[in-house]
Image (cartoon, rainbow, N blue to C red):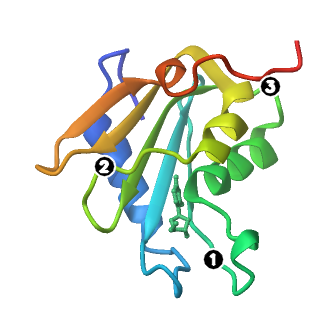
């Protein structure tokens, strides 16, 4: 992934959509993919992984987060995260994922979702989680 702050969000969304191809979603049939762009320019992706014990289900965003931290360690930082889901509505991260991603987000981190017309919509991650709980 190359480019400046005016990134090619379509490309990051495409990686999220690609990850959704691996979704394990026999219960909801909703395939979700996430692609994290790090400060260093690497992309990590993940998909949702459902379980018969519903509470054990892993969202795509936390799946991508696990890939990033497992590979780069906890110093990695998120510049942007794109989320794509199969029913074509914009897929905003659930509350647990917002909280889980927070410690790794740059202050200016961006969420990218796909609008109904297929174009990328961007939001600041900070706007998704006001008054966050942190350890400091
Ligand atoms: N899901 C995600 O992967 N990310 C979200 O932010 C919202 C929900 C998944 C979990 C479950 O497999 C399916 O979507 C339906 O809730």
* Rendered residue at 68%/28% (across/down): 102
Q: CA distance from mark 3 to mark 2?
A: 29 Å
Is label 3 in contact with label 2 (beta carbons under 8 Å)?
A: no
Which quadrant of the view contains residue 131?
top right
Q: Which residue is mark 2?
A: 90
Q: Which mark is residue 96?
A: none
* Rendered residue at 37%/25% (across/down): 123
Instruction: Say which element carries label 3.
Output: loop
Q: Which mark is residue 75?
A: 3
Q: Which residue is mark 1?
A: 50
Q: Nearer the viewer, mark 3 or mark 1?
A: 1
Residue 89 rendering spot, x and y as whole percentages:
27, 56
**Residue farthest along the right direction in this orientation:** 135
Label 3 environment density (alpha carbons within 10 Å; few <14, some 14–19, many ≥20): few
Is label 1 in contact with label 2 (beta carbons under 8 Å)?
A: no
Is label 3 in contact with label 1 (beta carbons under 8 Å)?
A: no
Residue 70 rendering spot, x and y as whole percentages:
80, 48
Q: Is residue 101 left or right of residue 48?
A: right
């Amino acid at each position: 992934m190359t480019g400046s702050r005016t990134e090619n969000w379509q490309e990051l969304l495409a990686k999220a959509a690609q990850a959704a191809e691996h979704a394990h979603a026999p219960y909801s049939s909703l395939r979700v993919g996430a692609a994290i762009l790090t400060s260093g320019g690497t992309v990590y992706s993940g998909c949702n992984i459902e379980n018969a014990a519903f509470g054990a289900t892993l969202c795509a965003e936390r799946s991508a987060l696990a890939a990033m931290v497992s590979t780069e360690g906890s110093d990695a930082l998120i510049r942007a995260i794109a989320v794509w889901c199969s029913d074509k509505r914009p897929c905003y991260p659930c509350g647990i994922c917002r909280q889980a991603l927070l410690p790794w987000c740059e202050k200016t981190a961006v969420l990218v979702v796909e609008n109904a017309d297929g174009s990328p919509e961007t939001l600041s991650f900070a706007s998704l989680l006001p008054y966050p709980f942190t350890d400091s």
